[in-house]
Image (cartoon, rainbow, N blue to C red):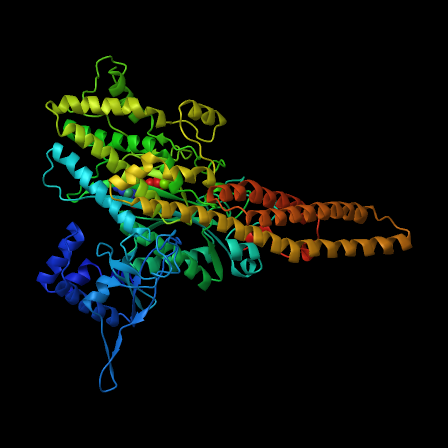
Amino acid sequence: MKQVTDYFGCLVFDDKVMKSKLSSDIYKKLKKTINEGKELDISVANSVALAMKDWAIENGATHYTHWFQPMTGVTAEKHDSFISPEADGTIIMEFKGKELIKGEPDASSFPSGGLRATCEARGYTAWDPTSYAFIKDKVLCIPTAFCSYGGQALDKKTPLLRSMQALNKQALRVLKLFGHSDVITVKTTVGPEQEYFLVDKEMYNKRKDLIYTGRTLFGKMAPKGQELEDHYFGVIKPRVQAFMNDLNEELWKLGILAKTEHNEVAPAQHELAPIFATTNIAADHNQITMELMQKIAKKHDLVCLLHEKPFKGVNGSGKHNNWSMSTNTGINLLEPGDTPSENAQFLLFLVSVIKAVDDYQDLLRISVASAGNDFRLGANEAPPAIISIFVGSELEAVLESIETGKPLKADGKSFLKIGADVLPELPKDSTDRNRTSPFAFTGNKFEFRALGSSESISCANIILNTAVAESLKQFADKLENSKDFKNDLHELIKKTIIDHKRIIFNGNGYDEAWVVEASKRGLLNLKSTPEALPYYLHDKNVKLFTSHGIYTTDEIHARYEIAQEHYTKVVNIEALTVLDMASKDILPAISKYSKELADTISAKKVLGVDYSYEFDILTKLSDGLKKAYEIKLTLEASLAKAKDISAIEKLSMFYKEEILTKMEALRDVVDNLEGLVDKKAWPYPSYGDLLYSVN
Ligand code: ADP
Ligand code: MG
């Protein structure tokens, strides 16, 4: 039997391969580029390209591609073969340094938010040497950033890399104050836990809503949902296990550290978690994971649904973004240390995150905002739309003691002087003690739990990195001029706790009382994407992005527009699908079944037998059909009205308030009728079929 250790990473041009394929001089130069961001000269790039090509061909590749992440949220690739003709009519396999470093795809069909006039269609992709090249379906994939010709970011990787650089810069300043001159880089790390649903392909193919929108737009709940809590961590069914085994194998070949797999809360829902990696690699790996989940599911006659809310009435899917910061010397900056100085440093980094989350709650909320995720956030299954931080009672006691100067323990003696005392033992929370918090400290990392399952993790991490970079910048600005470091450090931490403790909430985030309390504290509660997005353009946020070199003002406006437009397009497609299903399948099916009942009633009348059952159902169906038809007409009218709204903020709000509301009203009526109609007469597989047919 093949062993995982033998094939792990076999499709990755990783450090081991580099070492064996490159001369030691070239290897060293490449490593400098990877670790320290030093520029790579073309002769080195040529050598790397040659080695990469030879390795790729040995492993069955025929093509290469610059693999990138445009604003569509999915990855993009255009394949070029290695072949190059010779004068004698034969071919050689060729790949040059300049093809490795830079590509020039036509950018005109990717969302640019007005950054790039269609006439200047060229864009370019630039190699990200910090994320290893890999082979997928016989194609050598080179992770790249994607920019317009003017250098404006058109993708999600460019700002993510910029945000990592910003954090690196500020964290190094802070670390220097603690005497860490040996640290060369600070990188953020992420372990994203990915939730998903699996449904039978045959059932899926019969549902237009799943095909066009990824979620069910109609469907009466099955008699059984998740109320028995018997699916979470339950025995994995053989078909699902076979899928997971295949998936793990393919992920491992690509060097992705797939670690944990289990059934989730909803029926047919599952989760996969990898071991954490540097953020941009984690982001790349998460994109590949989502792609492979969908591809491998098909091989098993399954379909993997990554939508945030595929089924009404059971939990939707999210992504937990476990996040921390680490030095190249191996220190996790969110890990409490053993000495007073380590503890002081930990506390400063800790409060830098608390401050960042409070100052930029709006941006964090926006970073997880999407039409799909709007069905989860605040819906008593996922964290609320209010951003707050859970720190646990032990750490809260520490923060309180620093803030008030009161003793940490009841003994009246245990004061906590920063830089002089050691923190009490903090428990590592590996058990999700508070699953209702959107942002939880779990012992040595924070877990941002509000991400949607289908979205790239880049957006959330761009904001997180940048906001924390800003806190650290302010701290460094203050402390670098300090005459009495220990004392000023204590005061700074204390002041930060006082200023930002409103964001700390250890209670139940699902509780109605929290909504009231949060509002009293002045925390934002941005319930939907159209409500959240306008905050993107607020002065403080524009300043944050521009001052740290994450986005130019133009790039911010472009991204804002893309997000607004994306929202309206998604809801528009859903509305059109609702109309299509209602007009062509559902209403005709009800009408036809009504005729069957009417025929039976006529026959029974002639025979003089009781027809009250048929009559009762027929009456309900007729009433419902009339109601459904009326709502359908008003939905059509609203869609026509939407065409006349040009202001993007107004339009997205209109889609949320008018279109989504009417879609939901129509669904209510139809779902009710589904319960009255003969199963054979209903045009679609039921929720029971979808949620329980994979065994
Ligand atoms: P749980 O599964 O209970 O949420 P785990 O400790 O198993 O808790 O961690 C969950 C995720 O957090 C995993 O992907 C893990 O690799 C990741 N993780 C652990 N340490 C870090 C860290 N320092 N930075 C980022 N992610 C981390
Ligand atoms: Mg978790």
Q: Residue at x 65, y 46 (%)?
A: 634
* Lateral position of residue 609 relative to residue 581, left or right: right
Q: Residue at x 86, y 54 (%)?
A: 602
Task: Tell me: residue 607, above or below residue 230.
Answer: below
Task: Tell me: residue 482, above or below residue 231.
Answer: above
Looking at the rendered image, the quarter that the N terminus falls into is bottom left
**Residue 152 image point, x, y percent:** 29, 52
Task: Tell me: residue 584, above or below residue 416.
Answer: below
Q: Nearer the viewer, residue 227 or 43?
A: 43
Q: Nearer the viewer, residue 125 or 390?
A: 125
* Lateral position of residue 481 relative to residue 262, left or right: left
**Residue 21 can be seen in this image:** no
Quadrant in which ligand 2 is drawn: top left
- Residue with the most extreme bottom position: 88
**Residue 167 image point, x, y percent:** 23, 41
Q: Nearer the viewer, residue 542 or 411?
A: 542
